[in-house]
Amino acid sequence: MTSPDDVIELSVETPPGQLIRYNFAELVSALGAEDDPARVAVETNGFRQGLVTIYPRNPLAEIRAVTREDLVMDRHGRITCGRYHNGRPARKRLYDPSTGSAQRFLLFGTTGAGKSKSLQIELIAEKLNGIVSWVADLKFGQSVPEADGNVDWFVRTPEAAILMLMAAVAVAQERMRRYSAAGRTAFLLVSGGDPLIHVRIEEANRLLERGAPYRDLGTYLIKELGRTGRSVGVGIGLSAQASHLEEMGGSDTLRAMLKEGEVTLLRWSSNMMQQLVADGLVPGGEQLMPIGKSFQTRQLRSQFDPHTDDEDDAAGTQGMAYLLSGPRPTGLMRHFRVGSIAPLPGLDPEILALYGPGEPARLEAASHKAAGDAYAARHDSAAMAALCEAMQQEQAKQTAKVQATKGGRSAQLLEDRIRVVLAEAEEAMTAGDILAAVNADGGRQVGLSSLRNTLGVLADGGDVVRAGHGLYALA
């Protein structure tokens, strides 16, 4: 099918019993589009059908700037963050009014892919729509500096991020108690009610990668938010440069939970794509057209041609992505431009103008007590520094205990790790609580069944007592 703009669209279908498989480079060559492979867009339904669109020029080479109007939620809780290659709006959901559920967010992209600017779009939208934003920018605040002062809570260090996650879990639990008492089963985004809360961890791999000091605790808190936050209006979002499971807490549960939300994939590395496919974030049977680093088309010329220009001045592909959780997961899109194109020595005035004047949405007063000292001290740098230092000291103590525990061969046993946890506990613990504490001690991760078996052995030997139904304490 040919359009008036000389756009060619091919509808393809494989015989029954076969799935669509193709090599993008070979397809581009067959279509004679080697001059600019980005002129070719391929979408499949993951089975037998596909659409191949050939444009006279790259449809996403130019993209307009985002406006505040784009970022006002529609009746489905969506904002318009960019456009697809066919010119149609690309939307992300910030809230699901049909279920009353807060959203989960994953934003992946390699260095220079436009991850920070894409996150800025969502944070600006949150302020415009009255969503309470808690942001941990673990690049020391360098990724989204304009968000500081335009969100309810902004932190820059792993310690502060942990305090923020603890506060969010406590708020979710407090809301659950209030909602349960009122007979409510879902969150309602209504005027005068509790505000929607989004907790964002930028550069999440710095918190969750192997060897990070707060990895286990951070993973546990994020999983807890994912489990309990949806029905009480507390969403969680992670932005990271890589998607490998080991850089995201090493937790299959966490990954499986988060990938049910809004998943955005910017430019990736080959290793990242392999991991995304393996983890099921890319729908089975579907392929994604690769996103190059720039729009420049490599042309081979004689190495002795005096007119050969080696300067790399081609425009970049920042912001191009796939909305894997959207209705068109294999449709290439590009985020609207946000902020200045050229680097600036300070805060970007265009981004600040998009945030606009006025205070951001704040946490409801009914949850201030649950949010605790860290929330109360969020604008007091000295008080926050003291809380973070206390956390560092506590972490150092725990690390020292673990190292001491691992000093002898027998101290690496699960029995000894359980004894340490119960010895430090102020009251009897459930098996689930013991498991979380054991897996947060820096040692090898264990499963619930192994822990229950070991608890049984310790109880039979008299080292542990059953202090009540499902409760254990050190004898």
Image (cartoon, grey):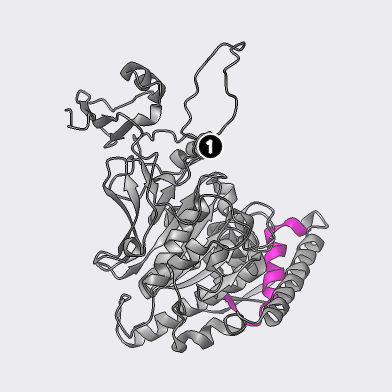
Numbered disc total? 1
Q: Measuring 33% from the left and 16% from the top, which residue is drawn there?
A: 30
Residue beneath label 1, please?
Answer: 269
Q: Determine whether the residue tagged by mark 1 lies in a helix, strand or loop.
A: loop
Image position of 389 with respect to 447: above or below: below
- 290 lies above or below 354: above
Image quadrant occupied by the N terminus: top left
Say which quarter of the image contains residue 174: bottom left
Q: Residues within 10 Å of mark 1 (few under 14, many from 20)?
A: some
Numbered range of the magenta stretch: 411-429
47 vs 407: above or below: above
| Image location (x, y in percent) of residue 198 | 45, 69
Q: Is residue 7 above or below residue 396?
A: above
Q: Nearer the viewer, residue 197 or 120?
A: 120
Q: Position of residue 83 (x, y in %)?
A: 32, 48
Hey, what amino acid is under mark 1? Ser
Residue 465: percent from the left, percent from the top? 63, 76
Asked where in the image residue 451 lies, by quadrant, the reply is bottom right
State the predominant SS element of the stretch in magenta. Answer: helix
Asked if residue 334 can be seen in this view, the reply is yes
* Horizontal and vertical percent position of residue 310: 60, 25
